[in-house]
Amino acid sequence: MLQKRLLALVGVVAIIATACGGSQATQAPASVAPGTSTEPGASPSAAEGNLAAEQVYRVWLTDVDPRSMQPQGASGSEEISVISAMHRGLLYYDKDGGVVPSLATELPKISADGLEYTFTLRDDAKYSNDDPIVAGDIVRGMRVLADPRNAFDYGYEMCWVEGADAVMGSDFGCQGTTPDVKDNALIDGLLQKLGVTAPDDHTLVVKLARPASFFPQIMAMWLTSPVPEKQKGYAEAADIIASGPYMMQSWTHNSEFVLVPNPNWYGDKPTLQEIHITMGGDPEAAVASYEQGDLDAVKVPGTSIRRVADDPVLAAEIKDVPQLSIIYFDFAACQQPPDKCPKSESTASGRSPTENKNFRAALTQAINKQELIDLTYGGLGIPAAGPVMPGIPGWPDDYDPYKFDVAAANTTMATALTELGVKDTTGPDGTPDGKVTVLDIGKMKFGYNCNAGHTPRVVYLAGAWRTNLGFSEAQFDISCTDFGVFRTERRDGSIYHISRNGWGADFPHPDNQLRDLFACGAGNNNGHWCNKEFDDLLNQGAAELDPAKSQEIYVKASRLLVDDAPVFFIGYETERHLVKPYVSGMIPTASDHNNIGDVFYEPIKILEH
């Protein structure tokens, strides 16, 4: 039976990682529904108790340094988790995902045609170095984000702004022709024409090239944080000038960040005097540190989800938080540009077999997603058929054309092999054996990031594809690297045939998942899938001001995407965390970045214990 075989395989990996023990049954820990905590700035409804003398909070982040501490260049959850504590833009999110003013005095004034946004900055805002925060700093930050020489993952979020098409073009997710990025004078001149201006120190005007009803949500992202004129680098703690509630006191590379309150923060003053964010080891080691009392909160990896629920002490400290996030695996779609594709000796084109829709669909049909979630995520999560998750108004869509069906998977795969022009090469001594099967495909490189709890999922997928489709043990060249290297390699598109991925919503709107992950040239489109009809639908949906009509357009776009199977969707996430009982005032949200409550560190307090 498939489940028994895969359970054994996954179990071996789990035992190597940790002694998981316990039964398969889980208790029902307290679930933290998004929106149940207090608003930022209000008195937290935490348990009564005296404050500890030392207000120090300790969490684990990742195994190595995050790739970038520059807000405009950050795209990973571990980076944003730290950045959001140190930087705030004009707008921010409340606990329910609503947009609220931060550096701005109020929400923007929007012109009748939806193309001009005017923001007013508060006059009491200063950076951690005592310099005032002015509108020109927002202009500077948005120009940095739109600069094609930086090639930031999220640069395409500027494509809505007037002038961005001219400076970025289609190579960076916008419209039109990309200019010569080596011509510095040309690029500098085009950036000066970007539709972001500061008439005075307290006024920012943004002009859009086309309507985008969700533009305030983009302005609430970490990407549009102000950049002071004196900011020169982000490589060391001393380099970073903060605009948010915390600033960086120290950065011991690949070991620890220490954040302390920003004395010039204009919002409610935080109680925590130090936040120690550690790096090194893996998620299981972090759980062990929590159990030893060295951490105050920790995310629980899949290999320990059941174990902690079976532990009477740890079970009382569990908090399950549904997330606006999805887990999936990229297939190399090889479509933009086509040379960004792993090579293959088995296909007529010489490119990865994953360029074929039916090949991707067959791999999807061969996986029992619920079983995968049960075995490798401890049963936490909901199987996903598309990218837009529950919690986004009106979603998810129930369209699922590639349900688990082994017989259908084999039929679809046979079609794919014919379309790919795969030749019979797997008989004795490499001679033909009279039939074309997946064994004729050869090796495929399967990548993921180490030390993040993903190994059991990769083992499950490879085992299921061997069992259900007939691949051999040696066909999957499985390898892992640290997250920074892996993200660079994954984005390259020509290295991995299949690669692990995940996405947390930047704002609660379907455009964020659909465009940011799958539009042609989008910075997070790691599989390089490209469909102009899909892009046109997204643009129509963004410009449609009637919410019901806009929703219909986005559903049509989503179904077009799902039909083409550019990625293998696994599930919508629920994260399990452990939090010490003396941690008070925490506000978990569905948009937490990397650790529970990291959207709002300010209300957290440490009680006597």
Image (tube, helix red, strand yellow):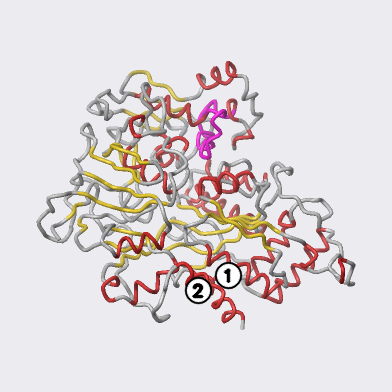
Q: Pointer 1: residues within 10 angstroms few (<14), some, or many (20+)?
A: many
Residue name at image x 33 percent, y 48 percent: 277
- For residue 604, above or below residue 116: below
Q: Is residue 96 magenta?
A: no
Q: Is residue 327 left or right of residue 335?
A: left
Instruction: Give the position of the C terminus as an image quadrant.
Output: bottom left
Residue name at image x 66 percent, y 75 percent: 405
Specify the amino acid type for callout 1: Tyr
The secondary element bearing badge 2 is classed as helix
Residue 570 is labelled as: none
User: Which region of the structure is painted magenta?
Assistant: 147-165
Q: Position of residue 202 (x, y in %)?
A: 31, 23
Q: Position of residue 432 (x, y in %)?
A: 89, 68
In terms of depth relative to the viewer, which is nearer, 455 or 265? 455
Label 2 – label 1 distance at C-alpha: 9 Å
Circles 2 and 1 in contact, beta carbons < 8 Å = yes
Q: Position of residue 468 (x, y in %)?
A: 68, 74
Residue name at image x 27 percent, y 46 percent: 275
Q: Residue furthest bottom?
A: 1
The secondary element bearing badge 1 is classed as helix
Q: Is residue 244 left or right of residue 467?
A: left
Instruction: Give the position of the N terminus as an image quadrant.
Output: bottom right
Q: Which is nearer the N-term, disc 2 or disc 1? A: 2
Specify the amino acid type for callout 2: Leu
Q: Position of residue 520 (x, y in %)?
A: 63, 43
Residue labelled with disc 2: 375
In terms of depth relative to the viewer, which is nearer, 555 or 363? 363
Residue labelled with disc 1: 460
- For residue 434, above or below residue 139: below
